[in-house]
Amino acid sequence: MIIFDQLTPQHMFDEDTWPTMAEIFNEQLSFLVRHRQSDEIVATICACDLYLAQEKHPYEPSSAPSLIPYFDLLEEMDDIFIHQDFKQELKPNMVLQIVMGATRAEHSGKGVATRLRTILCEYARNVRGFQYALAQTTNEATRHIYVNKMDGKELTIIDPTTWIWKKKNDKLCPYKDYTGGPIPNILIKL
């Protein structure tokens, strides 16, 4: 989606990645993977408590639209998860929201991404008491990890090509030409 929106890596970092990481850093639910021989960072994952995220930034359908439609799409998916998919009252340390993850291309296909996500979820469950994880992804390999390797269940699935940008209030479908596939709310029992 980021490529479709024609965002440069620097713009994405400045406008989303860095502010998000700075906000959730103190929750201590983010991890890095370092290569033993080179000591370089080869993968990372950032997560937060969905309850705290919603307390700080509740979904407001009538608020001003984001400059990037994808962010509004994800907010809407969070709201659908909380009010339709989850069917429970959201409480602190109940649902871990996996916000973003990345693995360097030369380390993909080696189990790094799977192991990193597994360690994150085990830590969240065993140390912090989380019961579930919520993931949303446009990447088929990451989707495979969550659904097939971590027994996640796909709940609501949104097709970006038919998604209407409600906050714009003009029936705009900003992703009508997107070819990357649907975005699911994936619930993982920890």
Image (cartoon, rainbow, N blue to C red):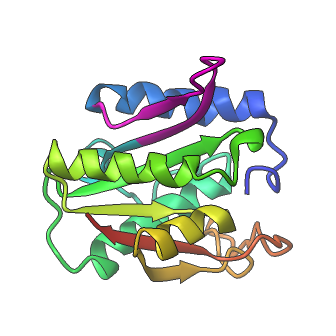
* Residue 155 place in picture, x, y as percent: 43, 82
Residue stretch rendered in magenta on the structure: 28-46
* Residue 42 place in picture, x, y as percent: 63, 32
Residue drawn at the location 45% of the way across and 62% of the way down: 135
Task: Tell whether 10 sits left or right of 132.
Answer: right
Residue drawn at the location 47% of the way across and 66% of the way down: 76
* Residue 166 place in picture, x, y as percent: 58, 70
- Is 42 included in the stretch rendered in magenta? yes
Tell me if residue 190 comes above or below residue 182 in the rendering: above
Residue drawn at the location 52% of the way across and 60% of the way down: 74
Task: Tell whether 23 sits left or right of 167.
Answer: left
Residue drawn at the location 69% of the way across and 54% of the way down: 109
- Is 182 included in the stretch rendered in magenta? no
* Residue 44 place in picture, x, y as percent: 53, 36
Give the quarter of the image for residue 182: bottom right
Name the residue nearer the viewer: 37 or 63.
Answer: 37
Residue 138 is at least partly visible in this image: no
